[in-house]
Image (cartoon, coloured by chain):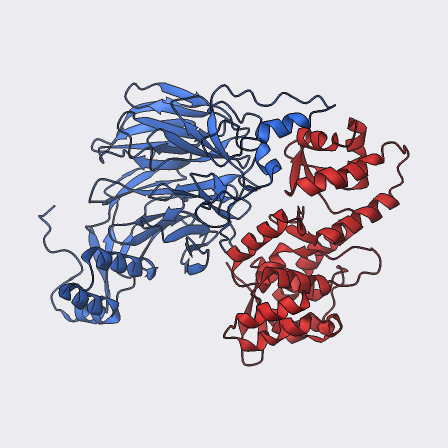
Amino acid sequence: MAESSQSKSGGKKRPRSESEGDPDADADAASLQSIQLENDLNFTDTAIALQMMKAQFPKLDKVVVRPFILRSQLYSSVKDRTQVDRDLESLKKEAVVRVFKLNTGKDDHAIMFMDDYLAQMENAVKRYDAKDKQLSDVFDWFKQYVIKSKTDVSISHPELCSLLSNGGDVTEKHVTLLINAGLLTRQLIDQNLYWFVIPNIGSILKGLSQGRKELLSLINRTKYKEMVLANLEKKRLRLSPLDIRFHIRDLIGSGLLKTVQSPIGLLIRLSRD
Amino acid sequence: MWTWKALKQREDGLLRPSAFRRGVVSSRASSLQLSNAKEFISLHRGAINSLEIDSTEGEGRYLLSAASDGTVAVFDTHRPTSSSTSSCASIAQHHPLFHLPRAHKFAISRALWYPVDTGLFITASFDHYVKLWDTNSTQVVLDYKLPAKVYGIAMSSIATSHSLIATATADVQVRLCDLASGAFAHTLSGHRDGVMSLEWSSSTEFVLITGGCDGAIRFWDIRRPGTFLLLDQSLSQLGTRPPLLPTPTPSNNESTSLPASSKSSSSTPILPAQKRRSHKKIQLKPPTQSSHPGMASSQNRATAHYGAVNGLRATADGFYLLSSGSDSRLRLWDIESGRNTLVNYEAMSIQTSKPIQLAVTPDSSLVFVPCLASLKAYDLWSGTTINTYRGHYESVNCCFFNAQDQELYTGSNDRQILVWSPSIPAATQIEEADSKGGITSIDQDNWSD
C-alpha cells in the first residue's frame, strides 16, 4: 500500500503542491503524529485518505475501539465528494470497508475497515458471555453468512433469518442474542428492520456529539467566530475522548465550519447560513 | 464579452444559432443576482409557500403565488404597474393583478396553473380542500374535500387523455381528482405515512412519482394498481448512466428490491432459485405475490432518504429525478434504471417541516435548492456549489426558474418574493440613467400583447 500510494499521488499533480509531498511521507506511521493538519487537507484518492485517517485515530484509554472514520471527515479531505461516494461504494462492494449508520445527527456514517470490524466483533463476543452455549453459534453464522454477503447498512428481519439459517436452525432467541451482544439494533421507524452497529461504541458516540457542540461553542464565543487552526489544535476538549483534529475534520466535512486562507495561515470559521 | 465575440462568430457562420442561444442562456443562468431592476410588491401576510409561472407555449408570463395566510395573488412578470424613481436607477414594481384575501381558511400549500392555459388555476390547502378557480372571475368552480391536509398537488403538463389532479396529503393514500367529472378518479395506496411531494413524469402522461414522509419514492402507473418502481438509496450505479456491459452485482443486493418481473432488464434470472435454496428451515412470509408488475412492493421497505422526502423534481428530458429529503441530502436518480447516481451535492441544510419547491434549468445544468435562509445553485452533474443566493431574512420555501427570461423567483417565510436576474453590466445602467424625461426600463409599446 505504501508503494502504490506513492505512485498514485505522484501521478496526479495539483496546484497546491505543498500537500502532495505529504501522502508519501504519511505512509510511514512513525512520522504521522508530527505532520500538521494544515498539510493534510487535500487528497486525490479516497483509499489513501481512509488509510491515513485510520492511522491518525486517537488513542483512547478507557475504551478499546478499533479505528473508524466518519464520512464527513472523508469529505473534508478529498475535494470531489461525488468521487468519494462512488469510491466508497466500490470499496463496500469489494468488502474492504464496512459502512454503519450512526444515530448521532442526521446523516452520520462511520466507515471501518473489514478486518478492524471483525476484530471488534470478536472482542465484543468474547466479552459478552453467552449463557446458553448452543446459541453462541449464531455469532459464527453471523460472521460467515450475513457480514460477507450483506454490504448495506441495514437488514430486514426475514432476510436476516434466511441468511443465518444457512448455518443452522435459527430462532428468535438467536436474534435476541445478536442484539444483546451489540451487533444489531432495531430501527425506530420500522420494527422489522435492523441497523448494523459497531459494538461497544456508545460512549464514544456520546463523546462525539458532545465534542461537536463544545467545539462549535468554542468558536462561537470568539469575537469574529473564527480561530487560527494552529491555535485551535492545541486545545483539548473536555467532554470528548476523541482528539480535536477528529472533530475539526468532521465539522468541516459536514459544512458547519469552513477553512479560509489568510496571511497568518489557515483559519477555521463558523459558516453562517 | 463572450456574447460580442460569439455574435461575430454566428454572423460568420462559425457558431450555429442554437449553440449561440444555449451559450447565452447558460451564461445568464449562472450569473444571477438580486435584481435591481424589478421587484414584486407582495401583499401576502404569511409565508409564501408556492410560486409558479404558467407554462403556456412561448409565453411564461403570469406568476401565481400562494401564502400561509390563505391568500393567492397573480403577478404579471413582463409589464410593471409602476416604478419607483430614485437618483440613479429606477426599479420597475409589479403589483399583483389580483389578490384573493380569503381563498382558503388555512394555509395554502400549493397553487398551480392549469397546464393548458391561464384560464384556470388550482389551489390546495391545509384546510383539506383542493379548489379549482376561474382566473377571470376569481370564483371557485369546483372543489374537492380530502380527508387530511393537502401538502401538494400536481397536474401533468403533457397529458392529452386525462385531466387528473394528483393530491398528496397527510393521509397515506394519493388521490387522483378528475377535472372533467368533478369526482375522485382513483386512489393509489402503498405509502406507509403521509405523502409530502409528488410530480408527474415529464416523459409519459401516465406515470406519477410520489415522495412520502416515510422516506420512500414510488413510481405509479395510473393505468394499473400498485407501484412499479421503488427507489432505494442503497442501489446505486457509478456514473450518471447505467454501464453498458452488465457488471456482476452481488445477487443479494437485488433480491429485496426490484420485483422479479420488473421492467429493468439488468436483474439476473438466477435470483429466485438462490432465494429458494436458502429457505431451508425457517418459515418466512411467502415472497411478494406479484401477479403483474404493478402489484409488487407492498412488502418493500426501501427508502430513498433517511427522513421525509420533501421535494421532487424531474429534469425536462425525463431521464433523471432529483429528490430532497429532510436528512438534508439531495439525490439524483436515474429514472430508467431506478438507481442512485451517487452525485453528492455539497453540504446543505434543508428545512424539515414543509415541502419545498426545487427548480432545475431546462437544459439540466443547474439545480436550485432552498436551504434555510438562502438558496443554493448546484451543478447538476458534479454536485459543486455554483452560487449561494442570500437575500431573504427567513427560510426560503419555494423557487421557480423562469426559462424565458432566465430569472429566478423565490418566496420565503419573510413574506417577500425576490427576483434574481442575470447581472446587467454597469454600462447599461449608466446609459439608462442619463436619458432624460422618464423611465426607460418600461416597455414603451404598451399596446402590443
Q: Against B429, is B72 above or below? A: above
Residue at left 65%, top 60%? A50
Question: Is residue A3 in sight in this rendering?
Answer: yes
In the rendered picture, chain B carries what hue? blue
Where does the image place residue B112, in percent across and percent down from the top left? 32, 36
Q: Against B281, is B438 above or below? A: below
Question: Is residue A192 in sight in this rendering?
Answer: no
From the viewer's perspective, tell me whether residue B419 is left or right of residue A95: left
Where does the image place residue A246, in percent across and percent down from the top left? 68, 62
In which image quadrant can residue B440 be found? bottom left
Residue at left 78%, top 27%? A172
Residue at left 40%, top 38%? B69
Residue at left 52%, top 21%? B290
From the viewer's perspective, tell me whether residue B138 is left or right of residue B449: right
Which residue is more in the foreground, B162 or B296?
B296
In the rendered picture, chain A carries what hue? red
In which image quadrant can residue B58 be found? top left
Q: Against B40, is B353 above or below? A: above
- Tell me the quadrant of the picture where the C terminus of chain B can be found: top left
From the viewer's perspective, tell me whether residue B281 is left or right of residue A82: right
Where does the image place residue B323, in percent across and percent down from the top left? 46, 43
Where does the image place residue B355, in percent across and percent down from the top left? 46, 40
Which residue is more in the foreground, B216 or B43?
B216
- Tell me the quadrant of the picture where the N terminus of chain B can be found: bottom left
Which residue is more in the foreground, B300 or B96?
B300
